[in-house]
Amino acid sequence: MSSRLAVLRIATAAVLTLAMAGCSAPLSENWVRYSFAPAPEDSGQAAETPPATDQGTKPEAERTPPNCSKVKCVALTFDDGPGKYTPELLSLLDQYDAKATFFLIGKNVKKHPQIVRDELSKGHEIGNHTWSHKDLTKVSIAAAKRDLQKTDDAIKEATGTDPTLVRPPFGALPRSLKKNLSVPIALWDVDTLDWKTRNTKSTIKAAEKIVPGSIVLMHDIHKSTIDAVPAILKDLSSKGYHFVTVTELIGHPNPGIGYGSGQRPATSKG
Ligand code: NI
């Protein structure tokens, strides 16, 4: 074969390899369990620093997250806050150097901006959970977009940074809106049903379903959940788990893609 053809073949192979590497990224449109990716050295968002404001929110000092492709990781997530129990939860998490992800309700952000700043400054991740817990499939696309934007704006106003994830209430998101999202969609695969049982023992029991790579759904607006957290942290910690944010767990989540296999709107409140 001519050398020109050989070059073409090599180039084609390189393109195919790149394309396949792209496919091996955790694309879970069917909410299937994603494969692990090594923790990113550079998320590409490091340059995003909060504007200089008198609120002085600063991300936690550089922290190297654990490599979740090599060690056991779990992403604990807390929805519907911030609320009056959140500060207690933040201290509990600190005791285990545990990082979590908070999916915030916009109107609660307006009420408790300092708590949101504390979440971020302690190294937790922040996601958008709509302004007032609306089912985004029950309103127009335009209204859903406005709702998410208003919530993003409230988070930005409070912290100087944008949320890095979205979790639609009930895990429900119109397909056409999904394509337009600039951030990944975080669902869950272990639902503690804490919002339903409002029972500390049941919440601890539900957490026994956690396996490496789980995204765990809880709510920091219930005292019964906060009271379950010490036992959950202690148990998982003794089993060698690292508590990471959703983005740290996944590695390089892609905008508009849903992560977590647990979309069960019939039984989950989200
Ligand atoms: Ni919710």
Image: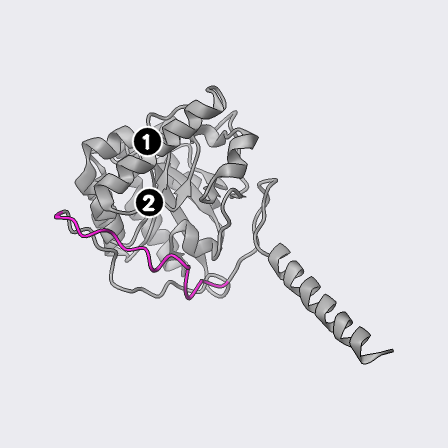
Percent coordinates x, y for residue 37 in the rendering = 52, 60
Q: Is residue 105 magenta?
A: no
Q: Residue tagged by mark 2?
A: 162
Q: Residue at x 51, y 27 (%)?
A: 265
Give the SS element for disc 2. loop
Q: Residue at x 53, y 57 (%)?
A: 36
Report the Cα–Cα distance between label 1 and label 2: 12 Å
Specify start and end residues of the magenta stretch as a single range: 38-54
User: Which mark, by number, is residue 150?
Assistant: 1
Q: Is residue 191 above or below residue 53?
A: above
Q: Is residue 157 above or below residue 246?
A: above
Q: Which image quadrant for residue 176?
A: top right
Question: As drawn, is 185 to the left or to the right of 160?
Answer: right
Percent coordinates x, y for residue 124 in the rendering = 31, 50
Looking at the figure, which quarter contains the N terminus?
Answer: bottom right
Q: Residue furthest bottom?
A: 3
Q: Is label 1 within 8 A of ligand 1 (CB to nearest ligand atom)?
A: no
Question: As drawn, is 30 to the left or to the right of 51?
Answer: right
Q: Residue at x 30, y 36 (%)?
A: 153
Residue 199 appears in the rendering? no
Q: Is residue 39 magenta?
A: yes
Looking at the figure, which quarter contains the C terminus?
Answer: top left
Q: Residue at x 22, y 32 (%)?
A: 110
Q: Amino acid at mark 1?
A: Lys
Residue 44 appears in the rendering? yes
Q: Amino acid at mark 2?
A: Asp
Dot 2 alpha-carbon crowd within 10 angstroms: few under 14, some 14 to 19, many 20 or more: many
For the residues labelled 1 and 2, say whether their Cβ atoms are less than 8 Å apart.
no
Give the SS element for disc 1. helix
Percent coordinates x, y for residue 170 in the rendering = 46, 29
The chief SS type of the magenta part is loop
User: Which mark, by number, is residue 184?
Assistant: none
